Amino acid sequence: MPLPAITAVHTHTLTPKGSDEHTDLLVVEEPLEIRIAYGNASRRQQLSVAVTMRTPGEDEDLALGFLFTEGIVQRPEQIASMRTLSDNTMMVELAPSISVDTERLTRHLFTASSCGVCSKASLDAVQMVSCYYPTRGYPQWPREVLFHLPDRLRQAQATFEVTGGLHASALFDAEGRLVLLREDIGRHNATDKTIGGALRQGETLPLRHYLLVVSGRAGFELVQKAAMAGIPCLAAVGAPSHLAVEMAQGSGMTLVGFLRDRRFNVYSHPERIA
C-alpha cells in the first residue's frame, strides 16, 4: 500500500534550553470533490455530491466508500467507472439504470476532516437505514484478541509513524488478523477508504465476518458507516458518543470503546465478546 502524501516543512522547536531549527514531515491535507454522472445515455447529468478534506491517496476507495455509506449506491457494480478529472476532483459514472434522489443531494456537502455529521443539515438527513443486520451473537471475539488489536493497528500505521498526524481504520477477522487498513487525516475518511477498499478488493456484502477498529473516538457517523456495511462490531481506541451508543444498540452492533492498555468497555450487544 503506497504511503499517503507527505510534505517537508521548516520548523523551530523551542525548549527551556533554547531553540532548534529542523525539517518536519507533515501529512498533506487537500479537498476532494466527488462528482457523479447518472441517467441514461441520452440524458446523462452530473452532480457534485461532496467536498471532503482528505489526505490524498486511495481516492477511489474514498469515493466508493462515501457513496456507499451515504446510501447513494448499494453495490459496487452500480458504479460503471471512476476517473480523476484533476488532482482534487473524482468523477464517478453510475450505471445508467441507477436512479439518484437528487432532492436529497441538492445541498453541496462540505465535510471537514475532523467531522462527518456536523456537515449535515440535520440528524434526519444521516439516519440511514442499513439493509444489513448483524447476526445476533456472531461472530465472537475472545477478549484476548481485542486486547492486542490497538498494537496491531499502530504497527501497521506506516505514515503515522513518520508524521503522527493520521487516523487509522482497519478490518480484522475473528482471529485478530489484519485484513485491510487505511489512513487519513479525517477519521470518517479513513473509514470510508477502508469500506471502499474492501469492496474494490472483491469483499462481498455484508461484511459480517469482520471487526472494524478505529484509532480515535467513535462518533455517530462511524457507527452509521459501519452499519451500512453490515459490520457487526466497531471498536474504538477512544470514547464513543451517546448517539453512537444509541445507534449501535438499535442496529444490532457491538460497540467497544476505550480499547487500550488491555482493557475496554462494551456499550452494546456484549454477546459477541467471548
Image: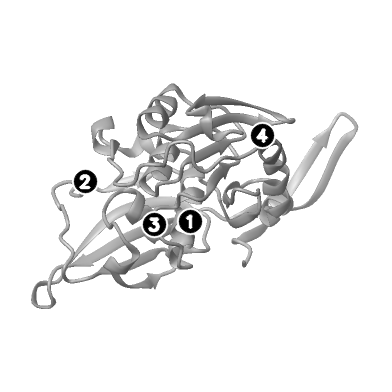
Where residue 127 sits, quadrant-wise, is top left
In this rendering, the label closer to the viewer, 4 or 1: 4
* Residue 226 visible in the picture: yes
Q: Which residue is mark 1?
A: 193
Q: Say left or right for 58 vs 49.
A: right
Q: Amino acid at mark 3?
A: Leu
Residue found 64% across the figure and 59% down from its top: 7
Is the C-beta separation of discs 3 and 2 under 8 Å?
no
Taking the view exactly as shown, the residue that stands out farthest to the right is 17
Upstream in sequence: badge 1 or badge 2: 2
Q: Which residue is mark 2?
A: 107
Q: Which residue is mark 4?
A: 143
Is the C-beta separation of discs 2 and 4 under 8 Å?
no
Q: Amino acid at mark 1?
A: Lys
Alpha carbon distance from label 4 to label 1: 27 Å
SS class, disc 3: loop
Q: Amino acid at mark 4?
A: Arg
Residue 205, numbered label: 3
Alpha carbon distance from label 3 to label 4: 26 Å
Alpha carbon distance from label 2 to label 4: 44 Å
